[in-house]
């Protein structure tokens, strides 16, 4: 059965003009893009989206980074979309990401890591509702 996930292209990747390459890889990997928009998160929006991390030491710099420029939000669809998109992204730390993953190719650091994808089908529904 087809599944949807929420994908973000983050401000570091947009600043480096990687958005076209990232979207190309997503399409090549067999995802359908069901919706897409470019926006600039407010501080309130970034804090709400990452509220689950609010006790972490990286929360404030993460919010600052995510509000530092525009982002692209997309609804991606295919069978097993949540897990398959996480595999396409690679792990949070690009230094640990396998050859061929988006974070290996496009991410700078664990914070400035180019892309985001929902980590479970339940969170995908919540994150899609947040942006769309
Ligand atoms: P993301 O998949 O969007 O989910 C939470 C984000 O917090 C993560 O990508 C990174 O941008 C950031 N993040 C997670 N862990 C760390 C960390 N240890 N140090 C800095 N930033 C982090």
Image (cartoon, helix red, strand yellow):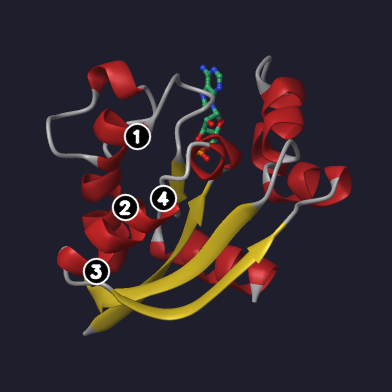
- The residue drawn where x is 12% and y is 31% is 99
Of labels 4 and 2, the one closer to you:
2
Camera-side mark, 1 or 2: 2
Return the disc, 3 or 1, that comes first in the chain's sequence: 3
Q: CA distance from mark 1 to mark 4?
A: 20 Å
State which quadrant residue 131 falls in: bottom right
Q: Earlier in the sequence, mark 1 or mark 2?
A: 2
In the rendered structure, find residue 119 and report the number of the disc placed on it: 4
Q: Quadrant of the N terminus?
A: bottom left
Q: Which residue is mark 3?
A: 27
Marks 3/4 in contact by CB < 8 Å: the verdict is no
Left-right relation of 114 to 67: left
Residue 125: x percent and y percent?
Answer: 52, 71
**Would residue 34 be found to the left or right of residue 45 on screen?**
left
Q: Circles 4 and 2: CB distance less than 8 Å?
A: no
- Element carrying mark 3: helix
Q: Earlier in the sequence, mark 3 or mark 2?
A: 2
Question: CA separation, marks 3 and 2?
Answer: 10 Å
Spatial CA span between label 4 and label 2: 23 Å
**Closest to the observer: 103 or 24?**
24
User: Which residue does the image show at 75% across and 45% down from the upper left?
Assistant: 46
Q: Secondary structure at mark 4?
A: loop
The answer to whether mark 3 is within 8 Å of ligand 1 is: no
Mark 4, ligand 1, within 8 Å: the answer is yes
Task: Work out whether mark 3 precedes mark 4 in sequence or the reverse, and give the earlier one.
Answer: 3
Q: Which residue is mark 2?
A: 21
Q: Quadrant of the C terminus?
A: bottom right
| Quarter of the image where one finds residue 115 | top left
Gap between marks 1 and 2, in whole Å? Answer: 9 Å
The dot on residue 36 is none
């Amino acid at each position: 059965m087809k599944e949807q996930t929420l994908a973000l292209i983050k401000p570091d990747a947009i600043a480096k003009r990687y958005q076209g390459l990232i979207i190309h890889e997503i399409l090549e990997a067999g995802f359908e893009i069901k919706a897409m928009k470019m926006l600039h998160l407010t501080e309130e929006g970034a804090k709400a989206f990452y509220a689950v991390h609010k006790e972490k030491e990286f929360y404030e710099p993460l919010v600052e980074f995510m509000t530092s420029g525009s982002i692209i939000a997309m609804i991606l669809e295919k069978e097993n979309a949540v897990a398959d998109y996480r595999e396409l992204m690679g792990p949070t730390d690009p230094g640990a990401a396998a050859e061929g993953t988006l974070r290996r190719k496009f991410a700078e650091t664990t914070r400035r890591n180019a892309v985001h994808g929902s980590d479970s089908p339940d969170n995908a529904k919540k994150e899609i509702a947040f942006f769309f």
